[in-house]
Image: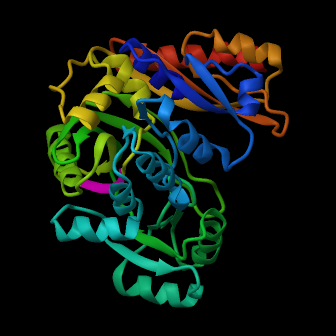
Amino acid sequence: MLRCVVADFRAGGHEVTVLLDERLAKVDAPTGANYTMQVLYAHEPKKFLQNAAKNYDAFYVIAPETAGVLEGFVKTVEGTGKTSLNCQAAAIAQVADKAALMETLQKNGVATPKTLTLNVHDTPSDISKKIYATLSYPLVFKPSDGTSCSGISLLNNPADIEVALNKIKKQTTNPQFLGQEFIQGIPASVSLICNGKKAVAISLNKQQINLTPPKGESSYLGGCVPFDHPLKQAAFAVAERVVEAFSGLRGYVGVDVVLEAKEVFVLDVNARLTTSYIGLRQVSDLNVSETIINAAIGGKLPEKPRIRGVACFEKTLTPTPSLGAYRRAIRVNGVVSPPFPLVDSSEATAFVMGYGDTVQEAESGLEEAKKSLSRITG
């Protein structure tokens, strides 16, 4: 994703400096930035933001919401007095707390799954009793401050509670978590550009989600942009209404939804750049990063973009490549992010994309890119 954002900022005429983990800097990670600052320790990014602010016009933070990471970095940027292209820190905090988010959405008449706020310190027996009074199986457990599918489980009966509870404890220190009705439907997301008050939905994106029982690992696998569906306009309308309910959401925001037969259910609001950006920039006539700048700084919202073709993208696991294989993988058509040769892991993750005039062509391109990558990494 970083590589794509940098390319779009530079295409808009901006000079870009990125902070990069020194392990990635050592292998010349292909960011495409004008300058790179290496990060050795976890505390260094905030120090850099504070000390180097005078040399830069604006900052854009790409980080997860988990444990307040995104909010904390954005607060640091706001404290420098320089321009932040992110959502305001206070707005990030509002939507990052999934329990509070669900409560706000329900009060505003937005369709959401039936939700219970539970506590990891309760016994499985006590949790089972609370579920019995409100929900039915199958249901979903998720951390209150999670990102993507981390810590999420699909429970089929009360016997799953203890393992699901332990999974959440490993993912977060937040004692609150959600028990939610499982909605049968198609997982999707809406990408929006916002100026802190108003929002414009610019694409509906199909998601590939692997939702597993507690002993497995639920995961976001990828998706396709755009996604044509009878509920597309309804999804746009509800996503815009949701984002406009929170003052200070600006720039790029993603709203996760499930498209049921006749209704759009809202699952989450992501006050950050989401993976769908990678596909959106491929099919849209907008420079999406430039629209982020225009919305965050000038309050200007884009017209609905013209969409051409389809982009399908996917995370794929590979063996950890040699340095030579990594360098060859960078050049493979369709490899958005290569598998990095980090010595502390036996596996690596690449991000691959296919593009075409139709979904079938895009999926075919995706498979070809995966095969090309596999021939290199083994």
**In the rendered view of the protein, which quadrant contains the C terminus?**
top right
Q: Which residues are magenta?
A: 265-269
Residue 130: quadrant of the picture:
bottom left
Can the viewer see residue 202 in this picture? no
258 sits left or right of 109 in the view: right
- Give whichever of 318, 203 is nearer the camera: 203
Could you tell me residue 137's position as x and y percent? 43, 72
Task: Write the residue at 58% across / 15% down.
Answer: 369
Task: Write the residue at 76% across / 35% down.
Answer: 347
Could you tell me residue 337's position as x and y percent? 59, 24
345 sits left or right of 313 in the view: right
> Was residue 72 drawn as part of the magenta stretch in this picture?
no
Task: Write the residue at 18% across / 46% down.
Answer: 240
Could you tell me residue 224's position as x and y percent? 39, 29
- Give whichever of 162, 51 is nearer the camera: 51
Q: Is residue 242 above or below residue 31?
A: below
- Give whichever of 257, 186 is nearer the camera: 257
